[in-house]
Image (cartoon, helix red, strand yellow):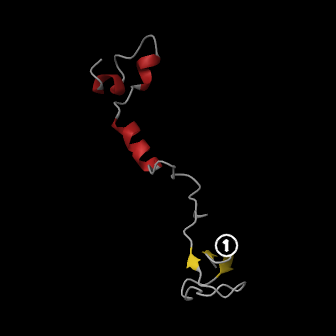
Amino acid sequence: MPVYEYECPQCQTVLEIQQKIADPPIGVCPECGGAVKKLMSMSSFQLKGGGWYADGYTSAQSKAKKEDAPAVPPCQAASAGCSGCPAAAASGK
């Protein structure tokens, strides 16, 4: 159940009330009986786990960038014998 914050301008009381989303907002301060206003506060909702980043990019986009890069033939690191390799032929070596 979400926690909502209310403030009473008359007595400066700040209330934290646990309510259902469908519940109507409270209107009266339980301390002084004055009218309360609902406050906007920081959300405690946070995305965690693989694929979510603070800047809004997912790991799928970073994978796509890696896949767009040209493939390096596995025999390119070898000192000799790459001329007969299909990977070397595909890369034009």
What residue do we see at 54% from left, 87% from top?
22
What residue do we see at 55% from left, 89% from top?
24
Question: Where, by quadrant of the figure, is residue 4 drawn?
Answer: bottom right
What residue do we see at 67% from left, 88% from top?
33
Question: Where, by quadrant of the figure, is residue 11 drawn?
Answer: bottom right
Q: Nearer the viewer, residue 30 or 62?
A: 30
- SS type, badge 1: loop
The answer to whether residue 61 is above or below residue 83 is below
On screen, residue 70 versus residue 77, left or right, reads left
Query: Which part of the image, by quadrant, shows the C terminus?
Result: top left
Residue 40: give x, y in percent of width and height: 54, 68
Furthest residue to the right? Answer: 31
- Please name the amino acid that badge 1 sits on: Gln
The answer to whether residue 89 is above or below residue 28 is above
Q: Nearer the viewer, residue 90 or 2?
A: 2
Label 1 packing within 10 angstroms: few (<14), some (14-19), many (20+): few
The residue that mark 1 highlights is: 12
Residue 2: give x, y in percent of width and height: 62, 76
Q: Nearer the viewer, residue 93 or 70?
A: 70
On screen, residue 9 versus residue 55, left or right, reads right
Question: Where, by quadrant of the figure, is residue 8 drawn?
Answer: bottom right
Residue 69: give x, y in percent of width and height: 35, 33
The answer to whether residue 57 is above or below residue 7 is above
Residue 86: give x, y in percent of width and height: 34, 27
